[in-house]
Image: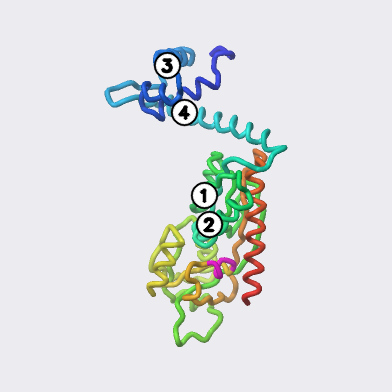
Amino acid sequence: MSPNFLQLRHLRYFLGIVDAGSFTRAAGMLHVAQPALSQQMTALEAELGVALLRRGGHGIHPTVAGELFYREAASIIEQVEQLGRMVRSVAEEPEGLVRLGMSSGFAACWASEFMEACRVLLPKVHLRLVAGDILRMRSLIASRAIDICFLLEDEPIQGFTRQPLFHQPLSMARLPFAEDVAHTISLERLAHVPLVLPTRPNGVRSALDRAFQGAGLTPNCIAEVDTFASALSLVKAGIGNVIVPKIVFPDIPGHRDLRLIAIDPPIHVTGCLIYSGNTPLVSAAQAVGDLLVTHVELALRKKESSL
């Protein structure tokens, strides 16, 4: 392929055609005449020596080679746009899109309050929140689909830049009962309590699995759920109990209906801000990260004052 042939417009045109599913719709979206758009794609395929698009009665679809070209083209366009944001943000107020990942527990407890803080303190930043487990967040960071994420770790996640924010023991949250008098629960007793546990992979679940296995115990897992909100609904229905880090307890929706019981000996998890070390954070993402650090510090003080 000629080194001077492929230009950004070819990538944008190809992405537009695949997204639109037809040359006609793509031409309207891209503000390019349809014959010119068709000629550009024909020339691109000829230059590459491979068919990228499959034309049929049900619209335009990428070939196998086209799917690969689409992924790489989208990544290149994203990097070009990110470069523009980085350059513009050096001397300006932080602005632009920031994609923030959070574990579902943090999202359930803190998302609304944190997003409101971003709206007020970073008015030019558009925050997009993605909730999910560790495996999904790692994949999204690696593919640059999110900029930063806030997760619970039981062991350090390798290959990324990590900023630990707290190291906290896990506790059991349950509905209060009249016979409750103890403020702690042993691991042996916890193994017989009905638990609603997060599905793997999950930082809390990994820490619990390791503790139970080390003690030769099997937890009484009555349900596995993908989101903290689902677990909380089962707890409030009296079906089971949930394991949480102490820091989030004051912010759990309806937490006054629940009682927190410490696990003895303690099982710790670490809350970390994680992002790719390969690309510097743009100022908007850095500003969101700094604000999140402040939010966590305030949550820690709030928890300490409530003890």
Q: Nearer the viewer, mark 4 or mark 1?
A: 1
Q: Residue at x 53, y 77 (%)?
A: 261
Image x and y of residue 180, in percent: 48, 85
Could you tell me which secondary element the residue under label 3 belongs to?
Answer: loop
> What stretch of residues is rendered in magenta?
247-251
Give 94 or 1, whichever is nearer the viewer. Answer: 94
**Quadrant of the rendered structure where residue 178 is?**
bottom left
- Sequence order check: which comes first, mark 3 or mark 1? 3
Badge 2: how crowded within 10 Å, few (<14), some, or many (20+)? some
Q: Nearer the viewer, mark 4 or mark 3?
A: 3
Label 4 sits on residue: 70
Q: Are marks 2 and 1 in contact (CB under 8 Å)?
A: yes
Would residue 229 be seen by someone viewing this image from the given angle?
A: yes
Question: Going by the picture, which residue comes out furthest to the left?
Answer: 57
Magenta stretch secondary structure, dominant? helix
Label 2 vs label 1: CA separation?
8 Å
Q: Residue at x 56, y 48 (%)?
A: 100
Image x and y of residue 184, in percent: 55, 80
Label 3 vs label 2: CA separation?
44 Å
- Sequence order check: which comes first, mark 4 or mark 2? 4
- Sequence order check: which comes first, mark 2 or mark 1? 2
- Sequence order check: which comes first, mark 4 or mark 3? 3
Image x and y of residue 284, in percent: 64, 43
On residue 265, which mark appears? none
Above or below for 197 versus 260: above
Q: Nearer the viewer, mark 3 or mark 2?
A: 3
On residue 33, which mark appears? 3
Above or below for 37 versus 191: above
Image side of residue 225 versus residue 248, left or right: left
Question: Given the image, on which type of amino acid does mark 3 rest?
Answer: Ala
Q: Are marks 4 and 3 in contact (CB under 8 Å)?
A: no
